[in-house]
Image: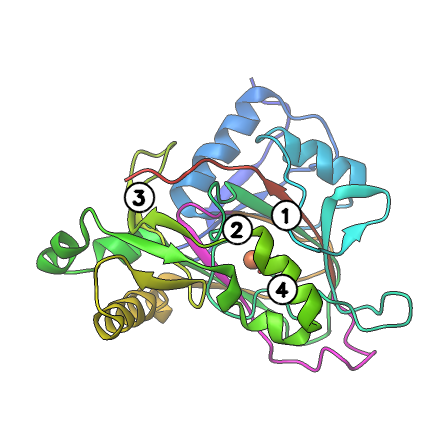
């Protein structure tokens, strides 16, 4: 049974699927949720355009996919809904928002924690006329497109993910950044992981946060990590989303990376970009 009539179309060869004709404010049954889940695990992101959701409706839809995370760090939360992480360049109490430059490099959300996020649902409330796109990459393909000898070398290896490498910390005052770093000590995760739903294997690493491969020298590690990110994020392996207000993108943090472009002036009041994000709790990545 399905409660709404919709169609699904790919967004690019490598990444993404759009559900057309679906209204997330209206009821969806378990079969619809399963279809969304399966498409997400296969395509790494799913897009729903033209949505008109209250914060509660956004939260209710997200909660059908798992427990919602409250961001572990000092984040900018919606005043009435701590589950909503605000990615916004609108001033807060007359001061520039701390989240006006979130995600300006290739990453998977909360990869620097023991249990990284399963997925995030970002809902665009206001977007600039031009700029502020988000780009996504498919980490199954990032693994598949490596040569067999290279893949064999990575088999069984672990990498260190360390929040203190975040370039965003430079924007915070030293006390806040020390407090944030103390909350999330470095963790190790397998470099090659198995997606718990699709059963397919993918690479698991981010730029900056993923700082070292266990057992390698610093130089070896840097060369390998650079190559893995460069290969993962080749243009052929991307989908670039130009946001419209009302778009909601659900991305899978277990098999995809994303990058929020800093190509517009975030401090120009004419460029309002205001998004609400929910984050689904995930499990420790398994090899
Ligand atoms: O603003 C965006 O497009 C994405 C920012 C980001 O990395 C996130 O919300 O996880
Ligand atoms: Fe992110």
- Is 95 contained in the magenta span? no
Callout 4: SS: helix
Quarter the C terminus occupies: top left
Give the quadrant of residue 6.
top right
Front label number (4 vs 3): 4
The CA span between labels 1 and 2 is 9 Å
Q: Which residue is mark 3?
A: 193
Quadrant of ligand 2 in image: bottom right
The residue stretch that appears in magenta: 252-273
- State yes or no: discs 3 and 1 in contact (Cβ < 8 Å): no
In the rendered image, the residue lying farthest to the top is 1
Is the residue under label 2 in contact with that under label 1 (CB below 8 Å)? Answer: yes
Give the residue at mark 1.
72
Q: Around disc 1, counting alpha carbons within 10 Å, would you say few (fewer than 14), some (14 to 19), or many (20 or more)?
A: few
Mark 1 lies on a secondary structure that is loop
**Proximity of marks 1 and 4: CB atoms separated by less than 8 Å:** no
Instruction: Please name the residue that numbered disc 4 is placed on.
Output: 178
Which residue is located at x 76 percent, y 69 percent?
A: 89
Decide: marks 4, 3 in contact (CB < 8 A)? no
**Sequence-earlier tag: 3 or 2:** 2
| Residue 110: image tag | 2
Instruction: Report x, y in % for residue 242.
Output: 60, 66
Which one is nearer the viewer's eye here, 60 or 78?
78
Q: Earlier in the sequence, mark 2 or mark 4?
A: 2
Compared across the picture, whether 250 is left or right of 155 comes to right
Q: Secondary structure at mark 2?
A: loop
Distance from Cα at disc 1 to Cα at disc 4: 14 Å
Cα gap from disc 4 to disc 3, whole angstroms: 31 Å
How far apart are labels 3 and 2 at the CA level?
A: 16 Å
* Residue 255: in magenta span: yes
Sort mark 4 into few (<14), some (14-19) or many (20+) by Cα contacts within 10 Å.
few
């Amino acid at each position: 049974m399905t409660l709404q009539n919709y169609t699904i179309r790919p967004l690019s060869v490598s990444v993404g699927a759009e559900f057309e004709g679906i209204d997330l404010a209206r009821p969806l049954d378990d079969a619809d949720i399963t279809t969304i889940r399966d498409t997400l695990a296969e395509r790494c992101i799913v897009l729903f355009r033209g949505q008109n959701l209250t914060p509660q409706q956004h939260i209710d839809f997200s909660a059908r996919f798992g427990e919602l995370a409250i961001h572990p760090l000092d984040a900018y939360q919606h005043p009435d809904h701590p589950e909503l992480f605000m990615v916004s360049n609108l001033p807060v109490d007359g001061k520039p928002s701390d989240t006006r430059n979130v995600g300006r490099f290739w990453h998977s959300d909360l990869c620097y924690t023991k249990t990284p996020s399963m997925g995030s649902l970002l809902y665009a409330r206001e977007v600039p006329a031009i700029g502020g796109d988000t780009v996504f990459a498919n980490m199954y393909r990032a693994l598949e497109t490596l040569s067999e000898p290279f893949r064999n070398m990575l088999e069984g290896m672990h990498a260190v993910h360390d929040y203190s490498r975040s370039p965003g910390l430079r924007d915070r005052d030293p006390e806040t950044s020390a407090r944030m770093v103390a909350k999330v000590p470095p963790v190790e995760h397998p470099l090659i992981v198995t997606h718990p739903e699709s059963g397919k294997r993918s690479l698991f690493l981010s730029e900056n946060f993923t700082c070292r491969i266990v057992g390698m020298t610093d130089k070896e590690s840097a060369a390998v990590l650079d190559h893995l990110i460069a290969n993962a994020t080749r243009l052929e392996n991307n989908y670039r989303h130009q946001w419209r207000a009302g778009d909601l993108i659900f991305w899978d943090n277990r098999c995809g990376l994303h990058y929020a472009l800093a190509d517009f002036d975030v401090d120009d009041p004419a460029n309002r970009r205001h998004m609400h994000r929910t984050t689904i709790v995930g499990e420790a990545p398994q090899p």
